[in-house]
Image (cartoon, grey):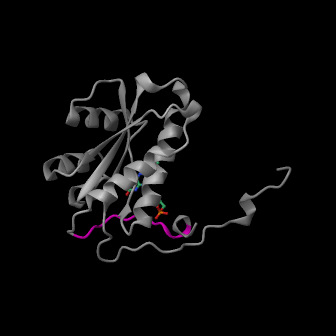
Amino acid sequence: MEVIFNRRSIRRYKNQPVEPEKIDRILRAAMQAPSATNQQPWEFIVVQKKEILEKLASISPYSKMTADAPLAIVLLANDDKMRMKHHWEQDMAAAAQNILLEAAYLGLGGVWIGVAPIEERMQAIREIFGLKSKLKPFCIIPIGYPGKGQEHKFVDRYDASKVHYDMY
Ligand SMILES: Cc1cc2nc3c(=O)[nH]c(=O)nc-3n(C[C@H](O)[C@H](O)[C@H](O)COP(=O)(O)O)c2cc1C
């Protein structure tokens, strides 16, 4: 899939709203992800209000771009939905990757802002939205049309020395 090879983290965005159909498509892609026992622990908060985007931007030194994105998706895992409690981060990572890939496919771009398992970032997000502790914030993904100097392009990371056949 070309989009896998060309996707890059996009950290600056055009001042252009994202069409609701594209947001819907991205959320559908997220929910197509594999998960342990198909438990699908995810929930999503789509944030478009500037004041909330600004609050999300302040949860870490590496999340500033969120303030200038037209939207951000906050990925949450609901503890009540987890049968395989130890696998929730892997489930959520698969959903996050689907979001980034679908966004790129649609001509948009995003970046994965790491939240879990850093407790202070998880707590900061819980406070922004008034979430109960059963909801585990996993990551934030600001999304928008790529801004100046930002583009999806292939960077070759293939490293044959990391591949082992039959034995290490
Ligand atoms: C778990 C995880 C956490 C990340 N956290 C951040 C972050 O807080 N801020 C940021 O700008 N990028 C973050 N990134 C994006 C990485 O920096 C980026 O994926 C990496 O540099 C490779 O670049 P690429 O996405 O363009 O291929 C994160 C990525 C992952 C997978």
Residue appearing at x 15%, y 53% in the figure: 50
Q: Is residue 11 magenta?
A: yes
Q: Residues in magenta?
A: 5-14
Q: Position of residue 111 (x, y in %)?
A: 38, 57
Q: Nearer the viewer, residue 120 or 108?
A: 108
Is 41 on the left-hand or right-hand side of 64? Answer: right
Question: Can you tell which quarter of the image residue 124 is in?
Answer: top left
Question: Can you tell which quarter of the image residue 139 is in?
Answer: top left
Q: Position of residue 110 (x, y in %)?
A: 37, 60
Does 22 appear above or below 36? below
Q: Nearer the viewer, residue 107 or 15?
A: 107
Q: Residue furthest left?
A: 51
Q: Position of residue 24 (x, y in %)?
A: 34, 52
Q: Is residue 158 magenta?
A: no
Is 100 on the left-hand or right-hand side of 54? Answer: right
Magenta stretch, main secondary structure, is loop
Q: Nearer the viewer, residue 47 or 149?
A: 47
